[in-house]
Image (cartoon, rainbow, N blue to C red):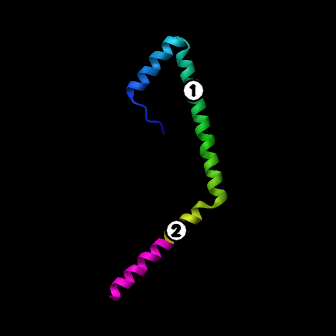
Amino acid sequence: MFQIGFLEILIIFLIGIIIIGPKRLPELFKNILKLYKKLETKFSNFKKDIEDDIGTDEIKKDVFNELRMDELEQDKTSNND
């Protein structure tokens, strides 16, 4: 999701040590990761619910079938020529 390199993580860690302090920093990171995972799970569930409501699986199947039928028709017309 995020593309953070080693240098960025190092800078964030150093700023965290300076501002928050070395004793509270691991606890803060742990809480931030828990919050991130919780939000990620909620967004994932929300996305799944929306996809289920609008029937994306059926739409994907229909689009695939239409594309396949178009390919077959093109093959049929090219073989007749």
Question: Around disc 2, counting alpha carbons within 10 Å, would you say few (fewer than 14), some (14 to 19), or many (20 or more)?
Answer: few
Where is 10 relative to 2, above or below? above
Magenta region: which residues?
A: 66-81
Q: Which residue is label 2 attached to?
A: 63
Tag shown at residue 74: none
Q: Which of marks 1 and 2 is in front?
A: 2
The answer to whether residue 76 is magenta is yes
Q: Position of residue 7 (x, y in %)?
A: 38, 25
Q: Which residue is label 1 attached to?
A: 32
Residue type, mark 2 in image: Val
Q: Where is residue 39 in the image (x, y as percent from the top left)?
A: 61, 36
Viewer-proximal residue among 35 and 7 = 7
Where is 66 relative to 21, above or below? below
Q: Residue at x 46, y 21 (%)?
A: 12
Magenta segment, prevailing SS (helix, strand or loop):
helix
Q: Position of residue 74 (x, y in %)?
A: 39, 79
